[in-house]
Amino acid sequence: MESASSIGGTLARFANALNQNGSSLNEFIEKNYLKKWVSDDLYRVMRIRTTFIAAMTRFLTDEGLLNLERVSLSPVTDPLAHDIEHSPTIRYKGQPYKTTHSMIYSKFLACFNPKIKGIFVDSPNIRLEIEDPNGIQRGKYLIDFSQMDIELRRSCRPTLDEYFHQREKVESILRDETETALSFFERLITAAVSEIVEKNADDLKALKVSLDVPETPFPRITRDEAVRLTGTKAFEAPLGDVFKTHFFWITGLMRENYDLIYPYLNKDGSKIPLSDFRSEQIYNYDLCARSRSDEGVWGQPYEVLSGALREWLYEPIVERLIDNKILRTRPQFSREGELLNPEDLDGYGPFLCAAHALTEDGERYFPATYGGGLGVERFLFSVLKGAVVKTVDDVTFFGKNPDSHPIYLF
């Protein structure tokens, strides 16, 4: 009852503000929701979305990946490298649970079973993005969105001894695994776009955009090369003048704590400062996508998929959490493997117990994986933006862009 009263009060104040400006709540709902819901434009976008999701699901299933259930609440979620307003928390049975930023930790744990090649899930994501101080509608952001989350076991899992003493061998393995990852996601995108081009030609034409099945491999550039070439750290948009194609990769961005950097730990326990790493030592990747109008004019590129080879050894996993200030102190375990200081680790205690656990053969359960998350609405916006689709709200029924509306009604 208290919650309903609070929502009702907010709506009443919002309606009064609209009335003072010569409008009404009914007019606001009709303009921002009803007309969009019944429009041919959104109908066509949703036809394309349906083809896109079905094609990805078919590809991933045919590749032998297993579908994972959604995890909307957990003691921990992706801490994210970029600023957000806050992490929503819900209490249930006396325990606080965070809403899902991404399912990254759940994906790792689901790949513990060596029989599992990989997993995928159309996952929920709630990220309370900070509003633009100038009130400008930044087209790519949603605070509530869908992401095709994918994680696969890597074919090779170097030991800690190899990590310390066989650097050239490990680097060669990681380069090969990166090529495997990029190839996998390129085949996924190519399969999905091929179905859209085949099944939704009329929809693309009505939305005044053209879309080609991409050639592989996609163009790629490292983050360091991109900065040198464009002269700015905001290089995503300027790279549109470099690559005349729908899709290209940017690799080697210093970002999340679970994205692999190597070499990072030394045998004596010292660490290479994170500020000293070059792109070639950071094994992650962003896929950028862009639209092209039916008149041949290219749109702005936007990042639509972020992924990486992941840290796989317990020791660097812990140190990366420390370096990124996600943990204040290291976990402590007894000789029997019992966690001694769960109160110091926030919600990460159970995750670190799993990462620390040993099989009967004395090996870590924790897998070596690569993966990525592809924002569904972000992808649709990026390849359809043009004369008809202008903002990310235009590819959603219930879009919640941080800059679009004072409050969200549905």
Image: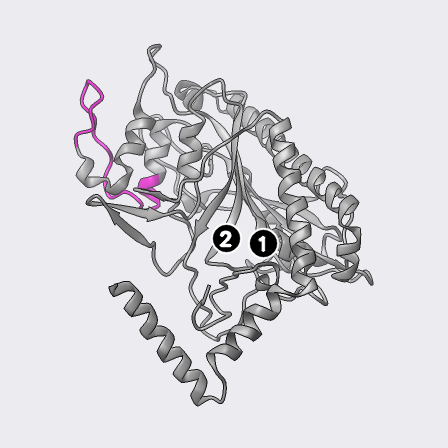
Rendered image coloring scheme: one colour
Q: Measuring from the top left, give residue 193's x and y in whole percent.
A: 72, 44
Q: Which residues are magenta?
A: 321-340
Give the secondary structure at mark 2.
Answer: strand
Dots 2, 1 in contact, CB < 8 A: yes
Q: Which residue is mark 1?
A: 378
Residue projecting furthest to the right: 295
Q: Measuring from the top left, give residue 4's x and y in whole percent.
A: 30, 65
Q: Amino acid at mark 1?
A: Arg
Q: Which residue is mark 2?
A: 145
Q: Earlier in the sequence, mark 2 or mark 1?
A: 2
Q: Distance from label 2 to label 1 (Cα)?
A: 9 Å
Q: Measuring from the top left, give residue 112's x and y in whole percent.
A: 42, 24
Note whether 207 is above or below 376 in the view shown: below
Note whether 296 is above or below 47 in the view shown: below
Place residue 65 in its image quadrant: top right
The residue sitting at 75% across, 41% down in the picture is: 194
Note whether 349 is above or below 197 in the view shown: above
- Depth check, front residue: 16 or 238: 16
* Numbered disc in front, either 2 or 1: 2
Q: What crowding class fits label 1: few (fewer than 14 Cα within 10 Å), some (14-19), or many (20 or more)?
A: many
